[in-house]
Image (cartoon, rainbow, N blue to C red):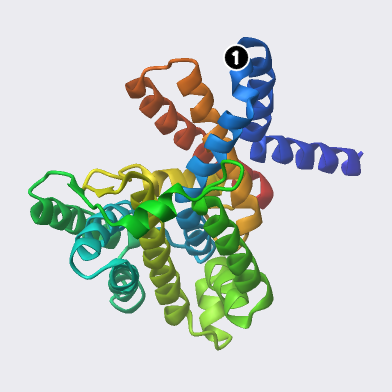
Amino acid sequence: MKKLTLDRDNLKTFFIRNAVSMILVIFVIVMLFVKRSFFLWDNIVNIINECSVYGVTACAMTAAIICGEFDLSASSVFAWSTVLFVLCCNTFGLAAAFVITLVCGAAMGAFNGLLVAKIKMSAFVATLGTMTAIKGLAYVVTDAQPINTNNETLYQIGQFNILGITLAPLVFAAVIVIFIWFLKYTRFGRNIYATGGNYEVARLSGINVEFSKFIVFVLLGVCAAISGMLYCSRIMAGWAPYGSDLALYCVAATVIGGTSLMGGSGGVHKTIIGVLVMAVLFNALTLLNVDGSMQKFIRGLVLIIVIMLDAVANMRSKS
């Protein structure tokens, strides 16, 4: 009888953790009958291309959440990277623009890492502050107007595709492989899990927990910069409002994939599922001509639901 109860509890926890994914499956089945164009190759390719840009940053956000942290400023780093990349392309050329933007993203991530790991500021407070400051910087530099580039090489890169698959999914795939290897097969990756699982125990066992937290913020800065450059290669422009939903999108995709906000568990391979769930859901809403404002409402609702389900699942696992 006890075993049966335990199995029921495990089953309930499983359904709670995978509720959004199961809703997605039902949603896709409904789309099969409501909107056949959803299953056309062009639309499938569009979903893959769209989710890959944010997916790069979602991988780094997963590492941060596993470590027990998160970064609200990723959205602003993304926007600033589009602006800086365009400015540098117009001034120094593509190669220099790539290096400068990447280094700047790493520096912004490092600053967040110092605030959280060394000065012991709350990640929410620290990254909220840097989010506002970086976004403001992007507005000041561009006079609150979008800026364009006519760099021919960047245009050719943006036009590259294999059967409709652009450069972004290829970069996303490479980032996935790197993060899976990094988190699963390196000592430092295991230290990130230990730090997020129990900070004090990890510290007392000799793990440099401050360095672990610092590095995940650096990785977030780098990946947000890469996402910004990938986006920029598609639209050949930079602007402060770009990517305003990036941070919350990445958190939602990570939690939907099954990585707990409590830290210490999860993985990038799970986040891939979350990224696809988000991309498929919002692509379907667009095909159904759902108003853009309503889509934003639904995104917020999805985020609330997945965080609530994560909290419930964690309470059940502890009881």
From the viewer's side, name the closer residue of 7 and 166: 166
Q: Position of residue 30 (x, y in %)?
A: 66, 16
Identify which residue is drawn at 44% across, 43% down. 249
- How many marks overall? 1
Q: What residue is rendered at 55% in x and 51% in y?
A: 169
Where on the picture, by quarter, is residue 151? Answer: bottom left
Residue at the spot x=17%, y=54% of the render? 138
User: What residue is disc 1 on?
Assistant: 35
**Mark 1 crowdedness (10 Å alpha carbons): few <14, some 14-19, many ≥20:** few
Q: Quarter holding the N terminus?
A: top right
Indicate the position of residue 45 as horizontal and vertical percent values: 58, 37
Q: Is residue 266 visible?
A: no
128 left or right of 174? left
Where residue 11 appears, as percent x and y from the top left, is 78, 38
Q: Residue furthest bottom?
A: 206
**Residue at image x 67%, y 11%?**
33
Looking at the image, can residue 24 be seen?
Answer: yes
Query: Disc 1 on helix, strand or loop?
Result: loop
